[in-house]
Amino acid sequence: MTTYSRRLLASLLLLASSTFAAERARIDVRTDQPGASINPSMWGVFFEDINFGADGGLYAELVKNGSFEFPDPRTGWKKLGDKQVDDRIRYQQRDGGKTPANQRYVDIHGDGTGTWGLVNEGFRGIGVRVGENYDFSVEMRSASNGLMKLRVELINEKGVLAAAEIEGGNSNWRRFTATLVPKATEAKASLRITAIGLGHLQVDRVSLFPRNTWKNRVQGLRADMVQALADMKPGFIRFPGGCIVEGPNLALRYQWKKTILPKEERELLFNRWNTEMKDRQAPDYYQSFGLGFFEYFQLCEDLGAQPLPIINCGMACQFNSAELVPLEDLQPYIQDALDLIEFANGPVTSEWGAKRAALGHPAPFNMKLLGVGNEQWGPQYVERFDAFAKALKASHPEIELIAAAGPSPSDARFQYLWQNWRQLNPDYVDEHSYSPPAWFIEAFNRYDAYSRQGPRVFVGEYAAHTKGNRNNLEAALAEAVFMLGLERNADQVRLAAYAPLFAHVDAWQWRPDLIWVDNLRVMPTPNYFVQQLFSLNRGSQVLPTALSDAKPGSLFASASLEESSGEVIVKVVNPTAQPVEAVLSLEGRRTTPALCRRIQLSGATPSDENTLEQPAQVSPKTEGERPFDQIQTFAPYSFTILRIR
Ligand code: AHR
């Protein structure tokens, strides 16, 4: 080939490639200009006892109303035997009603036939696995001339799955235990207790736990649910709510001090999600506080997450009673917050630090963040927050305080609060958004224009609500676009969490939710995988990223640098039905990028979802490392992460 024809061929090839390139989008990442550092705790979770998230969920107790303390002591229990002779099973007052947390027990009057007893339905059934150990316990005493026994059985429609007999003891209350080992797996078993013998067998605090709990803690948390959280490596856990912090009225607000007492002294409380949703009522929904503040702090420590408690600010839920504590009576509420800091961080020689130590944790929990109020609004909130902030900052300037921005991301209540927060300067403002997917896509730029002076942003609750409120790919991709916008603004937005976290398929009040469970299974949603991908591929610094030549709305991108490994992490969302090809240019790099690992979450349609049977239908797929290619194709309905070395 002559020099001339070689030149001609080269120009033709250049022409062809530039014509083709013009149809491609461009993503330009400035690798030599690392910007804001991304908070290592940026991507966290928000836990609330909603949708049977704690009782019937994370807290592994399998017996509902085991202490007969629900307002109707029969809740969850069915009597066995001849219904005509109802007086053989009676609910009676315990210890003259002196112990607020334990007011009742049940008296079973056995007639020697061994047919009198009760069946507990659990939380929409009791999930048990073949061959595993289940620890039954009960407080009992008996009044009889002969020996009485309690027969304990796990049953399903086909018969008995596991059984044990416990001698009923004497006239003193005592705790008895037995191990049940089911011969079959059953998601909806029941627990039957029957009095054997002639006389009165008195029974209280009936309990059944899987032995296999998270970290094998006695009466601990459901291992598979905690594992799903651990797999996200959350940067923080916001707890215990949510609206339950506020309560429908002040008497029903969340009081953390009552939740660190010995378990038998933790008083049952109405759960506001019992009645809150008119079409999803849950009359059997109460808070046992088996998962209390000590357990929350312990969970944070287990998962390496920052504890981020929310405390009542002297206001009940403004969607309910809106009851207010007068400003002059606010001190006990402020003291609760001060004591909480001492409980979490104080020395073992302090009053509340000593209580932490007595619970088995002398070392501090290193709490650094505290929310005052949940979704409050209006001048009454501003006044109350201010009173809290003055007292808390005076004694604990090291604790960063979070103020709420109300229940909506842009209404008049939100504007009013932000104006005030610009004056009062809390460390963070907690914004909440439950909006359609389009809102989240538009909000890609939301934080670009936020002032960098004053409070930073904590996006404490958000979820894209599709038609029918489904946890589908459409919602997950919209959230991913939003999260790209948060990442790009990581100097201003320092913390974020999806909400709500858990839902039981047979007991939910609110959807969508990040993780669905039944009594034996856990189903991560596409939304879960988006959260997990952001958390596991966070990066340490934002890299300036520019997108060009893409059809509006067809591609969204952000990039970060992982300083420790030198990797560039590029995140790209294509929420459309068409593939998008892009030239990915890493500007200012000192070496040629060598290898790239591609992780992609995608599906065939925006309505793709996971199911309990197929929990990984929509889940990320990771390709092995391969040489970096500047030309990347982003599949329809996809979220792609490129980790480039
Ligand atoms: O996440 C469910 C509820 O939504 C929370 O309890 C509340 O803060 C918000 O309104």
Image: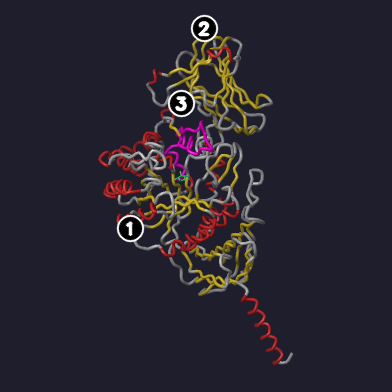
Q: Secondary structure at mark 3?
A: loop
Measured as percent of width and height from the top left, residue 357 is found at 37, 37
Which numbered disc flags the more N-terminal residue, 2 or 1? 2
Q: Amino acid at mark 1?
A: Arg
Residue 406 left/right relative to 438: left
Pick the front one: 63 or 541: 63
Determine which residue is flagged by label 2.
145
Within the image, what quadrant is residue 122 found in? top right
Determine which residue is flagged by label 1.
422
Measured as percent of width and height from the top left, residue 43 is found at 48, 54
Q: Quadrant of the N terminus?
A: bottom right
Determine which residue is flagged by label 3.
71
- The local crowd at label 1, few if under 14, some if 14 to 19, many if 20 or more residues have their Cα within 10 Å, is some
Within the image, what quadrant is residue 594 found in? bottom right
Which numbered disc flags the more N-terminal residue, 3 or 2? 3
Which numbered disc flags the more N-terminal residue, 3 or 1? 3
Q: Amino acid at mark 2?
A: Asn
